[in-house]
Image (spheres, rainbow, N blue to C red):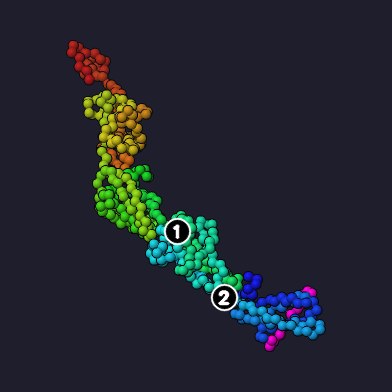
């Protein structure tokens, strides 16, 4: 303040106002043992800036003014030089440090902070709080327990960086080191993934009897455990290098539908629980393929047909089949064709005429869980034409080949 004669400048400057007939002004800091001549700045105003550093503490300035008549006047001024100010500190109040002591983690939405090393001559003690890129400054309070700061309203979860700025009466300013605290009033489970989902990603269907789960949680979670029996028994997950938590069931899990319970606990003591339903499916029927009876034009069951586009019936296809393929091999070349179910029936008919010869057909099935099965091969023979190579009159009694005989019971071959 201008009137308190307190400064943090070690080379103080003084201004002396005197009558205009004064022709000499000098100043002393040692009671008049040594003098320094001031300089006339304007009519009646003299100034002097100390040319060397003045020590810290209280001082008495002696001013002597002499006018042109030789009259002398002396006056003193008490002033103080203060260039020092302690570096303040800020820490989370012990009862509000709800995590591991000293980790600056709290589940309190209005935590209290203790400010230390604030000098008695502090004129202003301010706390700056940065959260989400926005900085807000608050005045700290000095009570029976010393300097403290408690936010007036609830803080949302997240990181808060606090720093203390102290200004003393001399204008010295000191800043604390920043303190970052994390407010964590609840914990979440971000995701639960069935890692060995053998079907479409996210449908939680697998043919693995020892399912592998990956749990993603915030970084402050320190315990993740899993249960398949509503929490009666638990298995502890392990955190991987990526930060996710992994657990592979150590024993075979039965076929069918299951409900997984996941519990996450953070270092602030908050808990969250989440469920995941999944299905284990390890079974798939073995399909069969048969030549349609109407196209089995030889002896029934001999798999000989005179149809160029014979039909085949496919059975043993489970309801959860996701892909049904028929592989047709002819003359050493194989072709794979996808089938679709029509009116609840699986059937295959070639889309173009088959030439005569042998065809081997195999059905391959894959279900939604990724299980695979295939039929026994079926070989069919396509025979669409016949020829008469020759007709011979066996008992030709004339010249061979003249087709004349005297036998009234002709014999033909």
Figure check: 302 above or below 229: above
Residue 227 in the image: state x and y as whole percent: 29, 51
Figure check: 357 above or below 65: above
- Callout 2 environment at 10 Å: few (<14), some (14 to 19), or many (20+)? some
Reading the image, the residue beneath label 1 is 110
Q: Secondary structure at mark 1?
A: loop
- Callout 1 environment at 10 Å: few (<14), some (14 to 19), or many (20+)? some
Q: Quadrant of the N terminus?
A: bottom right
**Residue 327 seen in render:** no
Residue at image location 30% in from the left, 46% down from the top: 259
Residue at image location 31% in from the left, 27% down from the top: 310
Cα separation between marks 1 and 2: 33 Å
Q: Which residues are magenta?
A: 32-43
Please name whichever residue, 65 or 57, is drawn nearer the observer in this view of the structure: 65
Please name whichever residue, 100 or 321, is drawn nearer the observer in this view of the structure: 100
Mark closer to the chain start, 1 or 2 = 2
């Amino acid at each position: 303040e201008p009137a308190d004669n307190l400064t943090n400048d070690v080379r103080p400057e003084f201004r002396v106002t005197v009558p205009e007939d004064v022709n000499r002004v000098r100043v002393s800091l040692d009671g008049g043992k040594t003098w320094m001549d001031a300089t006339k700045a304007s009519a009646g105003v003299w100034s002097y800036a100390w040319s060397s550093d003045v020590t810290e503490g209280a001082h008495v300035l002696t001013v002597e003014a002499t006018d042109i008549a030789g009259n002398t006047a002396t006056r003193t001024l008490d002033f103080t030089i203060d260039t020092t100010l302690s570096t303040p500190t800020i820490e989370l109040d012990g009862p509000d440090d709800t995590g591991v002591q000293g980790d600056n983690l709290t589940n309190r939405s209005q935590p209290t902070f203790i400010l230390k090393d604030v000098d008695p001559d502090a004129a202003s003690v301010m706390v700056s709080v940065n959260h989400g890129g926005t900085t807000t400054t608050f005045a700290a309070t000095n009570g029976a327990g010393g300097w403290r700061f408690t936010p007036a309203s609830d803080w949302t979860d997240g990181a808060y960086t606090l720093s203390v700025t102290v200004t003393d009466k001399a204008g010295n300013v000191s800043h604390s080191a920043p303190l970052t605290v994390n407010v964590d009033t609840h914990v979440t489970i971000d995701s639960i993934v069935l890692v060995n989902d053998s079907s479409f990603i996210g449908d939680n269907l697998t043919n693995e009897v020892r399912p592998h789960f990956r749990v993603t949680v915030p970084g402050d979670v320190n315990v993740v455990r899993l249960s398949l029996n509503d929490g009666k028994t638990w298995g502890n997950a392990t955190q991987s290098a990526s930060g996710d938590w992994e657990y592979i069931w150590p024993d075979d899990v039965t076929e069918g539908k299951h409900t997984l319970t996941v519990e996450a606990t953070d270092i602030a003591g908050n808990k969250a629980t989440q469920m995941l339903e999944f299905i284990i499916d390890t079974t798939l029927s073995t399909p069969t393929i048969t030549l349609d009876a109407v196209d089995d034009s030889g002896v029934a069951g001999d798999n000989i047909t005179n149809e160029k586009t014979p039909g085949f019936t496919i059975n043993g296809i489970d309801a959860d089949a996701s892909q049904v393929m028929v592989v047709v091999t002819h003359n050493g070349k194989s072709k794979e064709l996808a089938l679709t179910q029509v009116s609840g029936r699986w059937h295959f008919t070639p889309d173009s005429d088959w030439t005569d010869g042998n065809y081997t057909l195999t059905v391959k099935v894959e279900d939604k869980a990724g299980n695979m099965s295939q039929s026994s091969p079926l070989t069919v023979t396509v025979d669409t034409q016949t020829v008469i190579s020759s007709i011979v009159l066996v008992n030709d009694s004339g010249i061979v080949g003249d087709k004349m005989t005297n036998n009234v019971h002709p014999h033909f071959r």
